[in-house]
């Protein structure tokens, strides 16, 4: 970071933030990206489902992206943004190291944090390896293997179990803490040859560097080589900056998220949001696309402001 004033602060340098910064750099805006180095997919070795980047290491995407942003004058500051406050027509960005900078517009692209429920924390060490949340990210890699599903309620558990069946004909749904499954749900599972294991799960069985089974509270173990917990985790948006502004939120199946329109605008004038912080289902390519759209929208807003300033001067 070489200045104390920029057109745009991008908070979060994942796919969403970097693609916004790329567009803003190419529109010749002064942009600075703040990032504290905790991308959501850090545990994964490969990134799937991104045309032309399929299988790439997620860290490599960020390195390449940073290089591209720099080519167009974008700057980086590795650190945590602790607050953003309105300062007249501008915003003041405060960093954990005490530094402050002034910007005209703000993009929040801070992603989300996946949290396993307390009783399943033992699965955390295998997160992103064979403890998985997203079939579109990992399903193909574990195809034809003995797979398991754990959900926090019947709706989520059924959703993932029926979907995971696409990748394997050996799928087990662990009821874990689901008190009861309806006769209709049981029929659906039976129709798709998905087994049900009653009883609470206590943790993973790990041998060497891989998951080999799921242990139940009663001590028995069910052999599995990967478990999908997408229906059991909580996805917490890293949105304290947006909440501090009172940005409007709405509940969806995955929790309560700040609302951003199709171009990333929030209900807070001058503040945009893109990627997982507002859209938990966005994979990398979607987060990048949302960032690109927000970047263009922010450039348009700056263009309008520039025109108003020029007209005021002229008159
Ligand atoms: C294990 C796993 C595997 C996955 N595999 C795939 C896959 O194969 N394919 C796929 O398309 N998707 C995959 N995903 C989803 C992918 O992680 C998301 O789509 C993507 O990370 C969303 O990008 P983002 O820019 O919104 O957020 P992130 O990538 O999480 O980036 C947010 C950034 O903001 C920074 N940040 C947060 N708060 C602050 C702050 N206050 N100050 C400064 N910086 C801050 C963080 O350090 C982080 O770098 C996977 C997810 C997980 C959990």
Image: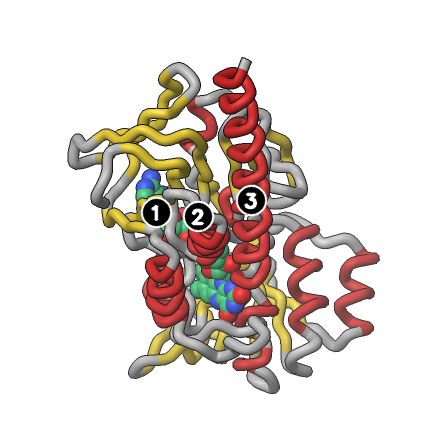
Q: Quadrant of ligand 1?
A: bottom left
Specify the farthest residue to the bottom.
144
- In the picture, the quarter occupied by the N terminus is top left
- In the picture, the quarter occupied by the C terminus is top right
Q: Which residue is mark 3?
A: 294
- Residue drawn 82% across and 73% down? 191
Q: Position of residue 212 (x, y in %)?
A: 42, 80
- Counting residues from the N terminus, which is met first, the one under dot 3 or under dot 1? 1
In the picture, the disc for residue 28 is 2
Specify the farthest residue to the front.
314
Alpha carbons under labels 3 and 1: distance apart: 14 Å
In terms of depth relative to the viewer, which is nearer, 145 or 119?
Answer: 145
Mark 2, secondary structure of its residue: loop
Q: How is the image coloured?
A: secondary structure
Mark 3, secondary structure of its residue: helix
Circle 2 or circle 1, nearest the eye: 2
Q: Position of residue 218 (x, y in %)?
A: 45, 63
Alpha carbons under labels 3 and 2: distance apart: 15 Å
In the picture, the disc for residue 65 is none
Q: Is mark 2 within 8 Å of ligand 1?
A: no
Q: Position of residue 201 (x, y in %)?
A: 48, 60
In terms of depth relative to the viewer, which is nearer, 151 or 132?
Answer: 132
């Amino acid at each position: 970071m070489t200045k104390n004033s920029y057109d745009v602060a991008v908070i979060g340098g994942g796919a969403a933030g970097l693609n916004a910064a790329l567009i803003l750099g190419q529109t010749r805006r002064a942009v600075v990206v703040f990032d504290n180095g905790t991308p959501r997919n850090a545990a994964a070795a490969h990134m799937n489902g991104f045309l032309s980047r399929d299988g790439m290491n997620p860290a490599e995407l960020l390195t390449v992206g940073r290089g591209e942003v720099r080519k167009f004058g974008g700057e980086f500051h590795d650190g945590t943004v602790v607050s953003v406050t309105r300062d007249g027509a501008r915003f003041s960005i405060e960093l954990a190291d005490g530094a402050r900078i002034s910007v005209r517009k703000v993009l929040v692209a801070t992603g989300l944090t996946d949290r396993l429920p307390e009783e399943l924390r033992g699965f955390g060490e295998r997160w992103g390896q064979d403890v998985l949340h997203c079939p579109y990210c990992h399903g193909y890699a574990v195809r034809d293997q003995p797979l398991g599903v754990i959900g926090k309620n019947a709706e989520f558990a059924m959703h993932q179990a029926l979907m995971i069946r696409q990748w394997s004909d050996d799928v087990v749904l662990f009821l874990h803490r689901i008190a009861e499954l309806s006769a209709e749900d049981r029929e659906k599972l039976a129709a798709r040859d998905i087994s049900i294991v009653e009883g609470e799960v206590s943790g993973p069985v790990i041998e060497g560097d891989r998951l080999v089974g799921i242990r139940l509270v009663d001590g028995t173990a069910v052999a599995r080589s990967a478990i999908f917990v997408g229906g059991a985790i909580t996805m917490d948006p890293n949105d304290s900056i947006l909440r501090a502004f009172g940005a409007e939120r709405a509940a969806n199946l995955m929790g309560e998220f700040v609302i951003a329109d199709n171009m990333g605008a929030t209900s807070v004038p001058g503040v945009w949001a893109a990627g997982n912080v507002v859209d938990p289902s966005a994979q990398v390519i979607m987060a990048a696309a949302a960032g690109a759209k927000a970047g263009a929208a922010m450039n348009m807003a700056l263009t309008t402001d520039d025109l108003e300033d020029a007209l005021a001067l002229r008159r």
